Image (cartoon, coloured by chain):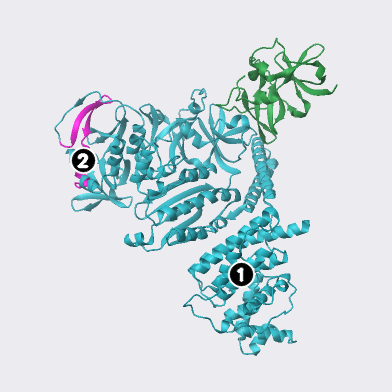
Chain colours: A cyan, B green
Amino acid sequence: MDEFDEIVREFLVESYENLDQLDRDLVGLEQEPDSRDLLQSIFRTIHTIKGTSGFLAFGKLEGLTHAGEGLLAKLRDGGLTLTQERTTGLLDLVDAVRGILAAIEATGAEDDADHSALVATLTGLQEPAPGEAVPTAENGPKPARRKPASKRPAASRRSKKSASGDDEKTQKAADAEPKPRVPLLGELLKQHAEIDDTDVAVAMLEQQLGDDRPLGEILVDHGQATPEQVAEALAAQAGVRSGSPAGGATHPGAVTDASLRVDVNLLDTLMRLVGELVLTRNQIVATAAAQADPAMLRSSQRLNLLVSELQEGVMKTRMQPIDTVWNKLPRVIRDLGVSCGKDVRIELEGRETELDKTILEAIKDPLTHVVRNAVDHGIETPDARIAAGKPAQGLLTLRAFHEGGQVNIEITDDGAGIDPAKVAVKALASGLVTPDQLRGMGPREVTNLIFAPGFSTAEAVTNVSGRGVGMDVVRTNIEKIGGTVDVTSELGSGTTLRIKIPLTLAIIPALTVECAGERYAVPQVSLEELLCIEGDQARTGVEYLSGAPVFRLRGNLLPLVWLDHVLDLTAAPHVDDAVYILVLQAEGRRFGLVVDRVLNTEEIVVKPLSRQLKGIGTYAGATILGDGRVALILDVRALARRAHVVRESDSTADAAKQTSVAAAHDGPEPLLVVAVGERRLGVPLSMVTRLEEIPNASVERVGQREVVQYRGQLLPLARLANLLGTHSQDDENGQLKVIVYTQGRRSVGLVVDAVVDIASEAPKSRGEVSEYGVSGVAVVQERVTELLDMEQAIMAADPRFFDAVAAAGAADVSAYAEMGS
Amino acid sequence: MEARQLATFTVGSLLFGVEVYTVQEVIRYQEMTAVPLAARGAAGLINLRGEVVTAIDLRTRLGLPPRPEGEMPMNVVVRVDDEPVSLLVDAIGDVASVSADQFEEPPETMTGPGRALVLGAYKLENQLLLALDVARAVDVGVAV
């Protein structure tokens, strides 16, 4: 009985694999209805299942696949053409087979489901549709059969009535089945030479009647094939046998004897052991380095290399191409497209990209969800697409590639895109953001609100022309495995979702840092860069925006978090006068983590925390470092949340950082203080979208105006020095410092000499002035500072700025503001 | 009367016992990694042959003053719900054989947080042996 169970299990494993292939082939076939290879492959798969199920006495499965096989045989031989009804029928067949297999897996027997309707449909589909050309000779009975009395039980049990011409061909293929992956010479010759089944059958018959010459020779003798054609076909056949891709008519999923099925549990055990070995290796290497014993040092280095190789090797065994998840998608998209009346084509790039099995399983659902969303909400109906000047067929592109030790997956559709304004309305309505926060956000940041928890639970989300259903779940699942997700969208032309995930979970590269005498590990995947500020900069570099510490990183404000504060540690007095900042990324946002010292990068093995400590939430686990000490692994997401920076700023839209940081705190509106010539000017921080440095050389002229190309658009520039009638100081670097202000889709750039500071305290006094370009004057940080008249400055760069923004239909920014009031 | 085997150890002036079969091993003091923000009583993490184990300081749990400077605790590693947890104690004692007729409810004389962590006391000849409620002792989330 055990042996039988074993056979059934193998049958199930093989059939599942075949069914996955089948889904892909069928959808492929719909695109390419004449492909003989695909039809052949599908036919074989169904035939194999039929044969084995007959042998194992799964009568229903056999009956069902038999009906499908009949249809396939007619399709393969050109007797029928593939219509959408037929494809649907075949896909239904695949589903039904899957259902029966699942029942067999669960109970060991077939379920009670009634498939007679499907069998009838499949049989009905074998009749030519009205108006369809009735095939001729192809459909007629074939004269010869190689082994008339087959030993296969499936064949012998078959009734006489069904032994039509199609069945005989089926039978011939069945005889080929014991080694189904190697195509018969006759079949190959049918493709390589101008011969048909009859010729081959006749030659075979001759063989059986005593002609002991090879098949090819007989055919050459009959003048039906040339010796070259036979040689070619033989080479193709040999190619399939040896597993090389030389074969012309090979089964797409040809496997060879070089592979082996291994129990995943065994691989998990191996992986765990290698993890332990890596730790021990780290310890030995650390000890050896401390001992100055050359022999020991050499051995430890050798060990180091070997263990690394072993680790890589074992990790590879757990790797599977992303295609194992993707291959379900064409079917998903087809079905969804049919059901919502959309025509969508899917393109898969990088399907061989490999990922750890655990991770693959974890991304399966989120990925399917995203793809469904793209078809459901992203891509428009054919009519709407044509009206928008796009091809009727929508395109969904999935790209996977390795980059920097991570796997990137991009899902791009050419649909309607996400309207940030609608997202904003939704987010405001469901109380996810305050109007103040919203005002500070860039379009991209607003778009990313679709990931906010609670966004999707709001009703009528599908009216938002974009995504929005369950995206928070998608993000949570991706982040659970240490990944990140981000969305960019161009209204009217499509949406791209980027997912970054680590290659594996068990062993991760991490940066070790020290804080208050203890070491902590930070996963590299969250780390964007490492900053060390020393000397004067260490004292002045950190600024405070209404009490919130920030660091000015290349013109953008980076909210800072002190690790010792977060962990509630009594900080040892700082001996080192340098400040180390880890620029970290969490939940699509960026913040700086200040630590005492940065130590090392190390491969660490993640160990779970015991029950007593799980509730803290600040740690993702623990690990054992090279010297045997335990170190805690920081959970960057939790840190960000604990430090309350997550809601307040964003890295993907650095744009909004300054304003949103500012908006999150009550008090006077902060001013960006800039220098223009001799003068000190204050610009309301809410009017600063971004600070940029632009090379002088990239400035071009359009008529009287200066422009630069900026993010795919023309950015009109105004030199504040000219506006205010002062002399600009020459910048020795040839770089222009530009304040960018964006409203809606229009941006202007205001050129200043230097960014001096951000002042968050209330101006001491204010006065009115009548000078052009200046709206007032105030004392800020003990110095007289003129307040820039933004409207005039913007008009100087782009006189039509406000008209255009207004015309664009209630500019997003002001629209948000109104909604909030 | 069935005899029970208790592994004994002292914390402060108290003698405690836990069922022998729950004890995985007893090891000397190990270097510990503190866990900031953890509940009081969770003293830190130790590396037990590649496994990360949480150490619970019984002095803290029992509301006793900290160990005097220079005195190193011992680790009694017990398995709770199949997870190893280390109990930090002052010194290790013998294995004591006790019977149920020696057992009594927690003594009236015992007050403070310790009382909740004790199942009862076995009256030995010259001392009381307190039966530690291990599950409660390691549940640092629960205040005692």
The mark tally for this picture is 2
Tag 1: residue type? Ala
- Judging by the rendered image, the residue that carries numbered circle 2 is A793
Residue reaching furthest bottom?
A222
Q: Is residue A653 visible?
A: no
| Residue A72 found in image quarter | bottom right
What is the x, y in percent for residue A432?
40, 37
Of residue A245 and residue A209, the one placed in the foreground of this image is A209
Image position, residue A417 (x, y; %)? 37, 52
Q: Which residues are magenta?
A: A772-801
Decide: is A200 above or below A658. below
Residue at image x 14%, y 32%? Answer: A770
* Residue A31 on the magenta span: no
**Residue that appears at 61% across and 87% down:** A224
Question: Disc 1 on helix, strand or loop?
Answer: helix
Q: CA distance from mark 2 to mark 1?
A: 77 Å
Q: Which quarter of the image is occupied by the C terminus of chain B?
A: top right
Write down the residue under mark 1.
A67
